[in-house]
Image: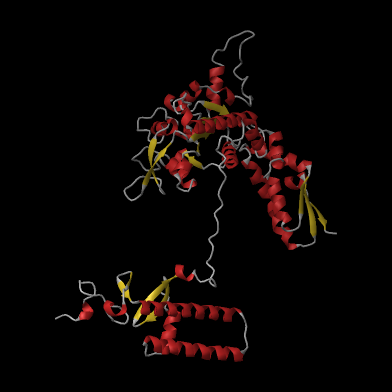
Amino acid sequence: MADDSDKKNNGEERFCMMCRRPESEVGPLVTMPPGLTLCNHCMQDMMNQAMRLFQHRNETTDRRNKPESAEDDTKKKASEENDSSADASKSGDSNPSQTKEDGKTGNNGDGFGIPIGGLRFIIPEMMQNNNPRVKPKKKPKEEELPDVMDIANLPVPHEIKARLDEYVIGQEHAKKVMSVAVYNHYKRVRRQEEEAFKDDVVIEKSNMLMIGPTGCGKTYLVQTLARLLNVPLAITDATSLTEAGYIGDDVESVLSKLLAAADNDVEKAEHGIVFIDEIDKIAKKKNTTSRDVSGESVQQGLLKLLEGADVEVPVGASSKNAMVPQTTVNTKNILFICGGAFPGLDEIVKTRLTKSFTMGFNSHLKDSFDDDPDLLSKTTMEDLREYGMIPEFIGRLPMVFALRGLDKEAMKRILTEPKNAILKQYQKLLAMDEVKLLFDDSALEVIAEEAVRRDTGARALRSIIEEFMLDIMYEIPKDDTIGTVTITGDYILGKGAPVIEMRA
């Protein structure tokens, strides 16, 4: 016959897990997870020991934080030992020192352990925070970015251009086109989301294609625009894209980067901007018999993204496979901006302009467009098709505009006028060493002339400054008496030294 203590929940009577007394003797039992049954007396005993443990831990923390005399410390230790012995004898534990030690070190990572009647109860950390003397740690608040895509807060085109003027020198036509396109795009997004206009006129997207020589500011314009509007931005390179099934990135990897920039928030990513650089590198190859997996095939793969469709996008990876989770992103409200240098396009434009070569007053000489800085602004769809872009791709980029190459005057302005101008960056670096850095007019002239000669755009400015600033940045920290350093044109040309003034 089975013992009565084994009949807990089999139909006759339940027993307290601590004192082993039946429910008929101690009254209704309290059921605790995972299936423990306790009487009111044992439950109260457990809570009393928990409070003693919390009190003991708080007193220990206060004693560590507050220096005390040796005599007071000895008295408190003796008092703590007596309390722990009394607790141990009351709970039936044969080793009082072990009970105290268990109460102090019974933390298994989830909370503090309290031994009662041969069992150990774990007090979770969340219950400890209910003690008024134990203050829970507050998590740092995450900075929430303001929603500037609201039509009421979206700046109008002239305000967007004014903000771009603070960072980008020149390119007035390009900044005007981008300001209008972005303003109209986000007006279109908000209009489609409003219920009152869902059956109204459908406004198409205004994707953009930027054409300009290297270093003229294509990528910098997009970066500045996305930062001012506070929208997710993904910058990708078209040279790494290939047709699906071949080595390289699929076209969906463009949206994977945008999703990562939006912290995997699909709704936020669907209002972002995608900039595809080096778009001229996927032009259709001429006179080739092999399959063009990185040219025309990529253009065809990008068609559905530019037009607007539901695309399965891998999360956290650039290619689809069974081990990578996927999500659906709708691209109808994503603004696509493509940019490229298109080397050789100027010759195609020049050939078209001089094709109707005639004699007389309305004739065009073949060399009349050789030095035209605005030659690329005369680009047409026919020129892009001859370059290697398929008609379907060009048709999904309705706004085509060109950026001018930078001349000497533009280079000088780039050095000093923008908010984060290159010279201001070096002046800030030396200001940390309490040294004032100055550039005279002759230095600006020499730097601008050398940058134009290198023909790599604004990127040449930093490389030139890095060359002649190397010795200065190396020598200045050695001498604490230097107060001002003036860079001259002769120093940049290697004919002299910078003008150094000592501190007063």
Examine the rendered structure and indicate whether residue 434 appears above or below residue 214: below
Residue at 40% across / 80% down in the picture? 45
Colour scheme in use? secondary structure
The x, y position of residue 351, in whole percent, is: 54, 20
In the foreground, 311 or 455: 311
Q: State whether residue 482 is above or below residue 346.
A: below
Measuring 62% from the left and 42% from the top, which residue is drawn there? 459
- Residue 159, given in percent of the width and then of the height, sits at 65, 34
Left-right relation of 469 to 201: right
Which quadrant of the figure has residue 327?
A: top left
Q: Nearer the viewer, residue 70 or 87?
A: 87
Residue 470 seen in render: yes
Residue 404 visible from this viewpoint: no
Q: How many numbered marks have been drawn onto this rendered protein structure? A: 0
- Residue at the spot x=69%, y=41% of the render? 418
Query: If the image is split into quadrants, where does the C terminus sit?
Result: bottom right
**The one of 332 and 421 positioned closer to us in this rendering:** 332
In the image, taking residue 399 as reference, residue 331 lies left or right, namely left
Please report the residue visible at 46 percent of the width from the left and 47 percent of the height from the top.
Answer: 260
Q: Which residue appears farthest toward the right when viewing the image?
A: 504
Q: Quadrant of the N terminus?
A: bottom left
Q: Position of residue 421 (x, y in %)?
A: 68, 44
Q: Position of residue 439 (x, y in %)?
A: 76, 46
Q: Residue furthest top?
A: 360
Q: 39 or 49, which lies in front? A: 39
Left/right placement of residue 89 relative to residue 502 reads left
